[in-house]
Amino acid sequence: MNKRILVLLIPFLAACAGFKYTPGTNSYEEFVLGSDGAWCWFSDTRAIVAGDYLYTGWVKSCGSIEVVERNLKSGESKIENLSPSLEIDDHNNPSFVKLKGGKILVFYSKHSTDEGIMMRSKIVGADSWGDEMSLKLNNLEGYKASGYFGDYEGAIHNLYTYSNPMYLEDVGENGRLFLFWRGLDYKPNYAWSDDRGETWSKGFIAVSSKISNRNQRPYVKYFSNGKDTIHIAFTDGHPRNEAENKVYYMKFQDGAFRNSDGDILSELGGMPVDPLSADLVYDASLGRSWIWDIKADLDGKPRIVYTVMPSEVEHNYYFASLNDGKWNSSYVAYGGRWFPSTPLFAKEPEPHYSPGIVLDSVDTDRVYFSSFTETGYELFTAVKRESTWDSSSITENSAHNNVRPYSFSYGGESYLLWMQNLKYVHYTNFKSRILLKKMEF
């Protein structure tokens, strides 16, 4: 069958035939980095490089948090279990940040508990990670006193999920370390440290509409240039709850959250940014969306990739770039439907779990994505050519589904990590592994 015809038929086949496919035979064993591990896509940076070492990690099927220190030159790996049986939930994957002087920090947490965000540190190449520290930075009493909650008398979400450490080396004498998480009021929260994580400010809410909805929870992706700017893309909320889930952009620069023109939306430690004051990247006119990745090009301009879902069985990938002060989006590829294996006769609880798309870490005109094919979910790469995208396959005839790619660079070259599912029914019921491949174009 002609491949173009197959792509056009897939949405129809998905709806009428339950996304049937015949698994192939390629298992890609030579690329396995972690034999038991999964991750979500809202705790980043998922992989960092310090010298010749790659640091990344995952949640095992038993709930343990594992991290790997991989020498990219020799190929040797050292895997450590930082938190045995923490919780069986792929929301809990670790995130990493590299500070001046060779210090590495790792963060992780359970999914929506009051136990805080865990932090450990080590020096690059050291034998082991330091002791675990719990950060409980939500500022419930401060926001109550400020009148933020108004006359609301119900229970206030005061839990912790996701961790996103971002470092700005050029801010202050020692650089400034930020930590973003989902916390108080289900909103993106943040705090900062000017002493390399030894002490922290109180927590502040980063984004919240002026007409606050206690159950509305924006989903956010962050990208730091490592020097002076953090690029931020976010949605109104979860696509399950938001019929018109839009995509927005802002940045943190020079002590304030700003729109792309540099206008101040909120000072550091100030009131939450109202989404209506940020850049509108996508208006939900083609269907509800969800955010997947954000990076900056060589000129420091932000690039964003996201999914648009006209229906739960049609997940389309889009790329957005900022040109002459205007956001422009282009269609990249069709992704399929959700990738979890829904039990027979059951209703899928996570129908918005797209197989995933990310931007390349070297060339932001290149993306990697997973899409449904005759053999299941395969990985592809695509390069922007003016108004079109040229795509080619990375995996073919796979024995297992390949999803949730992640890109990093080493020595100026691109590397790809991804999750391969031996079984994935739910974020609390999975048997997956993490693969690593150096990309050659």
Image (tube, grey):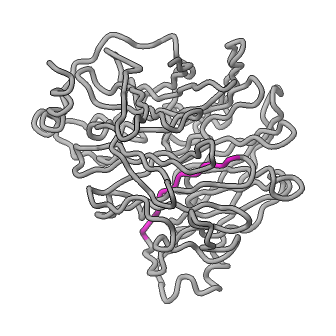
Residue 344: image location, x then y, percent? 19, 36
Apparent side of residue 423 relative to residue 436 in the rendered image (left or right)? left
Residue 100: image location, x then y, percent? 84, 42
| Badge count | 0
220 magenta-colored: yes
Front one among 77 and 224? 224
In the rendered view of the protein, which quadrant contains the N terminus?
Answer: top left
Relative to 364, is 302 above or below? below
Name the residue furthest right. Answer: 173
Relative to 336, is 271 above or below? below
Name the residue furthest bottom. Answer: 151
198 magenta-colored: no
Apparent side of residue 276 relative to residue 372 in the rendered image (left or right)? right
Highlighted range, magenta: 215-225
**Which residue is at 55% across, 34% downward?**
363
**Which residue is at 61% across, 72% downward?**
263
Residue 23: image location, x then y, percent? 27, 17
Residue 53: image location, x then y, percent? 73, 25
Front one among 73 and 387? 387
**Which residue is at 40% across, 33% downward?**
369
